[in-house]
Image (cartoon, rainbow, N blue to C red):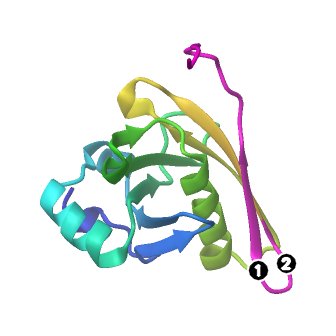
Amino acid sequence: MAPGDVARDLPCQVVSTGLPQLMVPLESLDAVRRATTNETPYYEHVVDGLGVKAVLVFARETYESESDLNVRVFVEAHGIPEDSATGSANTSLAALLLRERTSASELRLTAEQGYEMDRPSTLHLRADRTDDSVVARVGGRVSNVLEGRLL
């Protein structure tokens, strides 16, 4: 990623709906595709400096015409280089977008995630403004991909 890839209409910021995450708005789908974390700066500036273990990058340009956002989430500090569908991070994103981008009382968006991993996911984001806060939710369909038994 290059410095010009970061969108200028919304600041990079830490948002939390229980788990803090760094939100990074990008200008294009190409910028999202090229996004990576660099181990040393990630741990020094994001994990240690901000106290955040997850980085969400997003753009309004998408693979699918029915999607509103393309999202990637990196959580290397938890041993997961990239997650294919991240409810907590997308919930934070919905709250951020309602708070920062609109004066509306509600926001409904569809986010696509996991495309770069060949594990495409669709998440339905909802945020509602109350008198003193924003209530955010995420939903979608799931598929059983593994079954096991813990003894």
Classify residue 39 as left or right of residue 105.
left
Q: Position of residue 30 (x, y in %)?
A: 31, 45
Q: Position of residue 55 (x, y in %)?
A: 39, 58
Mark 2: secondary structure: loop
Q: The disc labelled 1 sits on which kind of residue?
A: Ser
The C terminus lies in which quarter of the figure?
A: top right
Looking at the image, the residue that sits furthest to the bottom is 132
Q: Secondary structure at mark 1?
A: loop
Q: Which range of residues does the magenta coloring cover?
A: 128-151
Depth order, front residue of 26/92: 92
Residue annotated with mark 1: 133
Vertical relation: 106 (above or below) 139: below
Q: Residue at x 55, y 49 (%)?
A: 69
**Residue highlighted by disc 2:** 130
Q: Quadrant of the N terminus?
A: bottom left
Residue 83 versus residue 64: which sits nearer the camera?
83
- Relative horizontal placement of residue 15, taking residue 13 as reference (left or right): right
Horizontal side, residue 99 vs residue 28: left or right: right
Badge 2 amino acid: Thr
The structure residue drawn at horizontal position 38% and vertical position 75%, both measured from the top left corner, is 8
Which of the 4 image quadrants contains residue 25?
bottom left
